[in-house]
Image (cartoon, grey):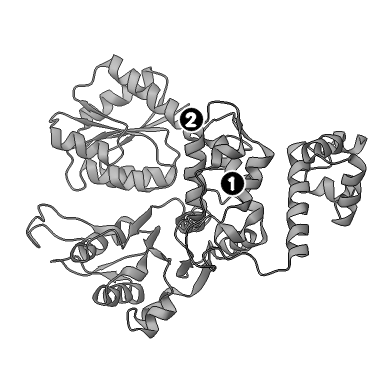
Amino acid sequence: MAVVLIVDDDAAIRDALAEAVRDLGFDPLPAASGGDALAALDEKTVDAALLDLRMPGMDGLEVLRRIRAGPQAPPVTILTAHATATNTIEAMRLGAFDHLTKPIGRTDLARVLSHMIASRTEQRPQPGVAAPDELIGSSEAIRSVQKQIGMLADSDASVLITGETGTGKELVARAIHDHGYRSRHPFIAVNCAAIPTELLESELFGHVRGAFTGALADHVGAFRQAERGTLFLDEIGDMSIAMQAKILRALEERIVTPVGGKPVRVDVRVIAATHRDLRERVRNDNFREDLFYRLNVVPIHMPPLRERISDILPLAEYFLAKAGAKKQLAPAAGAELIRYGWPGNVRELKNAMERVLILVRGEIIAAEDLGFLEEPQAGPEAVSWPDEDLPTALARLEEMLIRRALQRTAGNRAEAARLLNIHRQLLYTKMRRYGLDLSEDRTNGVGSPDARRQ
């Protein structure tokens, strides 16, 4: 039975909603305040939430913000007797599923609950399908990152993720959070480069009402929003020296001071990321050395896509499948994706797949459909390929293509040979060369009954 969280400080309204929710066939979970609601979410899986806007203490918008920041956040509908354009827009901006005016009729309640629970079901990952935040790939480079995530997820050590723009640094941070003991608490991401310097302190540490012009209400700030969870500071290399000093103090003392307010102790894990060379910035006095070492307790480097050649096709197919498309890549199109240098990394690949989904009408994506991919006009180091000789690189690519063909055909060697456009006996020879015998096939899921009959 689906669980519906009901948050309202008015006991009569709360009881009436609970009775209606129960009559509609759902399990009501009443909460008298925002704090009680957040505590309930920590204890029980909730499928939908009805949230009062005006409550003493923590108001509905702040509760909504915290719920939406958490992992597996349920859909939330705001209920208010005082609907205005401002609170409606703000609620929807913060991710509310709907915004309804009290008193809410039974028909409207039934409608919104059914839609919320249906959307919740659609959001849940289906068996065998990668979750939205999964790090796709089986290359040695990405496997190394995945292993590091597993080893450090349950620690509180600071992590510094480096890598070019578009490599998926936030995905790594989210994976660390989702696989650790803090996963039931908020993951808050702040892009330090996207916030003006004069506003960053307030955004991170919060402010009290009246602390400066425009501070019309208290704001808790990202550190306190991430309480007991994870704060992800993206592009920290762009932060000013003055702000770096305040971040260092917060990390060392676990205390933040809101603008115009008093120091507050926080319990939060900090993960930072940057595409810049922080060691170089330290040498140039653009980044504090003490902060660098405080952040760099556990370094993780996200490799560029051009160094993850064997992950390119699985990633492309994942993006196509994620969109629900039945389109497939022709072999020549796959070769074109592998050939391209991907200066924009995984983000560029994702955008490219979204583009062909829109522009290609047929079910097969041909090489000419990828004609918009052009190498950047830059020096010879614009694309940095793995440091190995040509025979080794060709052998690695050949083995990857054979493994992929066997996986796509569930281990059927005849079908795999047809897919690769080679004779079946030649496939057997190459499988023996790369150690792809029957015992290994069973381990890797390609030793199916079809494969053993070949």
The dot on residue 67 is none
| Residue to which mark 2 is pinned | 122
Relative image position of residue 163 (x, y in whole percent): 49, 65
Q: Nearer the viewer, residue 311 or 271?
A: 311
Q: Residue at x 24, y 60 (%)?
A: 203
- SS at mark 1 in the image: helix
* Residue 192 relative to residue 45: left or right: left
Label 2 vs label 1: CA separation?
A: 22 Å
Q: Is residue 132 visible?
A: no
* Residue 2 relative to residue 219: left or right: right
Residue 29 picture quarter = top left
Q: Nearer the viewer, residue 156 or 273?
A: 273
Relative image position of residue 275 (x, y in whole percent): 43, 66
Q: Residue at x 29, y 46 (%)?
A: 65
Q: Earlier in the sequence, mark 2 or mark 1?
A: 2
Relative image position of residue 115 (x, y in whole percent): 38, 23
Amino acid marked by disc 1: Leu
Question: Is 11 placed above or below 395 here?
Answer: above
* Residue 414 relative to residue 209: left or right: right
Question: Is 201 placed above or below 182 here?
Answer: below
Circle 2 or circle 1, nearest the eye: 1
| Residue to which mark 1 is pinned | 315
Relative image position of residue 271 (x, y in whole percent): 42, 65
Q: Nearer the viewer, residue 238 or 329?
A: 329
Q: Residue at x 47, y 53 (%)?
A: 183
Disc 2 and disc 1 in contact, CB within 8 angstroms: no
Q: How many marks?
A: 2
Report crowding for label 1: few under 14, some 14 to 19, many 20 or more residues within 10 A (C-alpha): some
Q: Is residue 410 visible?
A: yes
